[in-house]
Image (tube, helix red, strand yellow):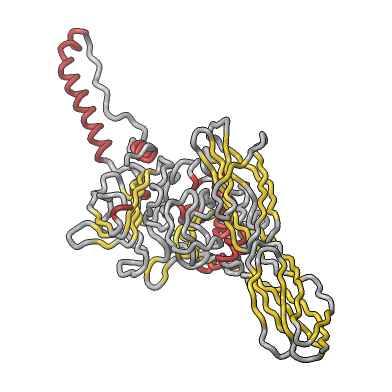
Amino acid sequence: MKATHRRMAAARRRCARRQDGTAAGPRPAGCASVAARRLHAPAACALGLALVLLCLWWLGAAPRAGAADILGPNVAIPFPLFPTDNPWNARVDTLPLDPHSAAYLKSIGLDTGLHADFGTVWDGAPNGIPYVCVSGTQKKVPVSFDYADESDPGPYPIPADAPIEGGPSSDGDRHVLVLDVDHQVLYELYDAYPLAGGGWRAGSGAIFDLGSNALRPAGWTSADAAGLPILPGLVRYDEAVTAGVIDHALRFTVARTQKAYVYPATHYASDSTDPDLPPMGLRLRLKAGFDIAGFSPEVRVILQALKTYGMMVADNGSNWYVSGAPDPRWSDDDLHELSQVKGSDFEVVDSRYLQAGAIVVTAGGDAALREGQTFARKGSFVDEGSGATRWTATVDYGGGAGEQPLALAADHSFRLSHRYAVAGVYVAKVTVQADGGTSGTTRFELMVRNVAPRIARLARAAARRGVAFRRRVVFTDPGADTWRALIVWGDGSARSRRPIGAAHRFMIGHVFRRDGVFTVTVRVLDRHGGSGTARFRVTVRG
C-alpha cells in the first residue's frame, strides 16, 4: 500500500538543514569591469555549479537531526496512528449505551479488576507487545503464512533482530510489529519466527496504511483475532508518561467471545452463539463518574483514556487484560493500581454510531414476558449521513414466520407488537434500509416464560358402585401448547392417562368397585413441564 501522509519524511528533511543558519557557500567575488565579468563568466558558472553540488552532497550525507530518536524498538512515535476520524481515535464518552451492555459485562466479570498486560520484565522477557520503528529504506524480506488466504502478502520490512512478543523463545502469540515511519505504513505479524536463510514464517500478517480508514475485508483476520491493528491500541510510555495524554482507544482481551464481530472488527474467533458473550470489536468505556483522582499520574492518564476513548475487545485471552508496549521505565507497582478498577465500573457503548453513513436502529434491549402475552415496544432509527430520503423497514419476531413489513413514522419511529403463544427464547430483528441500499439492523432477545395450565374448580360428586362415573374437566392455558391428563382415582385402582385436544376441556370416566368416599386428583401437564392440579371427592354407594 502507498501511504498518503508524508509528514514524517518532510520533518526529517527539515532536520537536515544546517543548524547554524549560515549560507551554503561563499558568494563569488565582484569584478572591476563589465569586460572582466564577461571574461570570468564561464569560470564563475563552473564555481557556482560546484558549490550547488557540494551543498546537495552535504544535505544527503550529513546526519539528520533526531533520526535516531524515531528509529528502533519501542521508541516515541511522533505522529498519530490513523486519521483523527478513525474508529481508534474517535471519542466515545457521549455515545449511547449498547442495549445488551449489562449482559456483556456480566459475562466478562463484574468483580474482576483490570490487569496491565505490560510493564518492565516478565518471565525473563520484556513485558508487553513490542514494536520497532524503521526507515523507509529498511530492506524488505519474504514472509510465508499459515493463513495466507487472509494475510497481506510480503515482502515486509522486518529487521533480522526485530523484537518478538515474549522474547525469541516465546511459545505465546509472538507478535511482531514494524512501523515504517517514512511512509507511515504498519506491518504486523502473528506467531512470527525468523528463518535461518532470511525472511520470516508467521501464522498471519496484515499491512495498514496509517493515512487510511480502510478496514480489513469482512471475515478476514489480521495479526489480531478481531482483524484489527494492534499498535494503535497499545498503552505506550511516550504517551502515558512523557506526553501525559492518550488520545486513542486501547486494546484488551476477554476469555470467551461469541461467533460475531461488530464495527470496526472484521473477524471472530469462536464457535459460541451465546448472545451474552462479547463479540470481537466490542467497545467499552469507563463510567464518567468513576473517581480517578487517587491514582498515580500514569494510571490516571490510562483511566482518562478509558473514559474518553474506551477500549476494544481484540482477542481471546484473560479477562480485562489491557495491552501495552514494554518499557524499562514503567513502574510495575503503579500499573498494578489498575486492579482496583472492576468490570462493574465499565459500560458498553453502541459502536454503530461510529460508522460514517450508518443507519442505527434502536429497539430496546432484551425482555421477558409470559406465554400468551403480547410484546409491545416503540423503537426508532437514526441515519448518520447515508443521504437517503426514503426508508423501508422489516421485522422478524423470531417465531419462524420470517420478515414482515414494518411501518415507519415521519419522525423515524416504529411500533412493534406481537403475541408469543409458545414458551421459548426468541431473537427478534428489526432492519431499516435506505433507498440507496445502506441498511441498519438491531437484534434483541425475548424470553417467553411458560404459564402452567389452570384447572377450573371441581365440585364434590356422587357415584354408584359398578356404574360408570363421568365428569367434564375444563382448564385454561394462554399458550398454544399440547397437553396430557393424569388422573388418580383414589380407590387403589391404576391411574389413568390421556391426551387432551386444543379445546381446553375433556371428559374423565371411571367405574368404582366399592363403596366409600374417594379423593380424585386430576393433573394437566403441558409440553414445557408446567402443570395444574385439581381435586374433588366422590361418594360411592351401592
Count the marks.
0
Q: Quadrant of the N terminus?
A: top left
- Is residue 31 left or right of 412 when viewed as pictured? left
User: Residue 182 versus residue 286: which sits nearer the camera?
Assistant: 286
Query: Does residue 193 appear anywhere in the picture?
Result: yes
Residue 322 x, y percent position in the rendering = 50, 61
Residue 419 x, y percent position in the rendering = 67, 54
Residue 471 x, y percent position in the rendering = 76, 75
The residue at 43%/46% (across/down) is 81
User: Residue 140 versus residue 278: which sits nearer the camera?
Assistant: 278
Query: Does residue 349 appear anywhere in the picture?
Result: no
User: Residue 496 versus residue 442: which sits nearer the camera?
Assistant: 496
Q: Quadrant of the C terminus?
A: bottom right
User: Residue 278 versus residue 483: which sits nearer the camera?
Assistant: 483
The residue at 60%/63% (across/down) is 424
Q: Determine whether 340 is above or below 200 in the image.
A: below
